[in-house]
Image (spheres, rainbow, N blue to C red):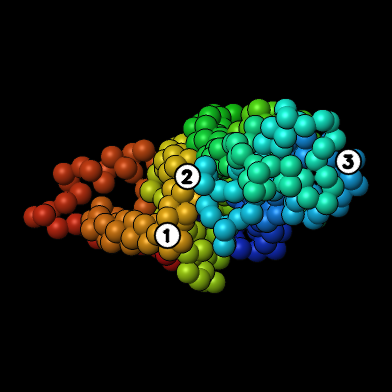
Amino acid sequence: MPSFDEALQRAGEFGRFQRRVFLLLCLTGVTFAFLFVGVVFLGSRPDHYWCRGPTAAALAERCGWSPEEEWNRTAPALPGPAPPEGRGDGRCQRYLLEAANASAAPGALSCADPLAAFPNRSAPLVQCRDGWRYVQAHSTIVSEFDLVCVNAWMLDLTQAILNLGFLAGAFTLGYAADRYGRIVIYLLSCFGVGVTGVVVAFAPNFPVFVIFRFLQGVFGKGTWMTCYVIGIPWLRTTVATLGRLGITMAFEIVYLVNSELYPTTLRNFGVSLCSGLCDFGGIIAPFLLFRLAAIWLELPLIIFGTLASVCGALVMLLPETKGIALPETVDDVEKLSSPHSCKCGKKKKPQVSSSNL
């Protein structure tokens, strides 16, 4: 019985049919990439926002202020450049204009200078609890769900939840693809990504957004893994020929080699396991990225770059696959570990066909 590589060589490794399949599968990869970078647009923080109390809102309506006028007359001034979000951020506080109404008649706050009702124009400051007002061209989840100040960490949570969905999808849909068929799981995952994407776009509140963001990650990982494993026999030649640049090349080669380390019958589950561990790191990464960047902008790049360099160096120490043809079945894996496959501590050189290169 011919091996998989021999059958692939007879059928043609990268003909017209393979090119069409590869291009169609690339469409899935493009949509999967949007799940990663989407937070850049979904979670864009407005540069101009302030805490708005009930008295300031009523005063703005009575005086007919523009957003700029309301901000200048009722919001605390920021000393210098905007500091990182937190309790010291002026945008997270507001003037307690309600204190003026306790000792003056209603309507005593003037439209020209509301702070004149306080001694030395010094109104008391309180933490924001009544919502914010945003000035921006387009709404984002930050302005929709008030993910600023004490709630700023919830933006990091949305990306962590997406990676948690990747982790869940890697184990569940990866196993299902091997058991029930990759085409079935691929089509089911594509449908799931479409439905969850619509719900995420029109989510009425933050809990609904988070739940369907998680499901979006589950189905997104299902589409990516199945289409990747379906197209990997053709991708081997393409990646080896064209190559990649920088981190893209390293990322693709890691997945390419990883998928070839397992027998064909267990390949989806093997890729799922390693991809799941990658997603576990992705759950933690958003918190490290945004919180460490607030301390020092280059600190996340140093940490991630150091870890990638160390891992890449450690891989060079693995002797198991050096000069050995990659296994196709469980029996092939068992033969690799058999004592008959080695003589005098030296590896037996196998016959490597051109299709294995």
Query: Where is residue 322, by image quadrant?
Result: bottom left
The alpha-carbon separation of the residues under discs 2 and 1 comes to 14 Å
The alpha-carbon separation of the residues under discs 1 and 3 comes to 42 Å
The alpha-carbon separation of the residues under discs 3 and 2 comes to 39 Å
Identify residue type, mark 3: Glu
Identify residue type, mark 2: Phe
Residue 123: image x %, image y %?
Answer: 65, 42
Q: Earlier in the sequence, mark 3 or mark 2?
A: 3
State the residue at coordinates (63%, 36%).
128
**Label 3 residue SS:** helix
Judge whether 318 appears above or below 340 on screen: below
What residue is shown with label 3? Answer: 61
In front here: 123 or 198?
123
Direction from residue 166 to residue 65 in the image, left or right: right
State the residue at coordinates (42%, 55%).
295
State the residue at coordinates (21%, 42%).
338
What residue is shown with label 1? Answer: 296
What residue is shown with label 2? Answer: 287
Name the mark on residue 174: none
Direction from residue 3 to residue 104 in the image, left or right: right
Identify residue type, mark 1: Trp
**Label 2 residue SS:** helix
**Label 1 residue SS:** loop
Q: Residue furthest left?
A: 344
Task: Kindly report which numbered mark, 1 or 3, lies closer to the viewer in this rendering.
Answer: 3
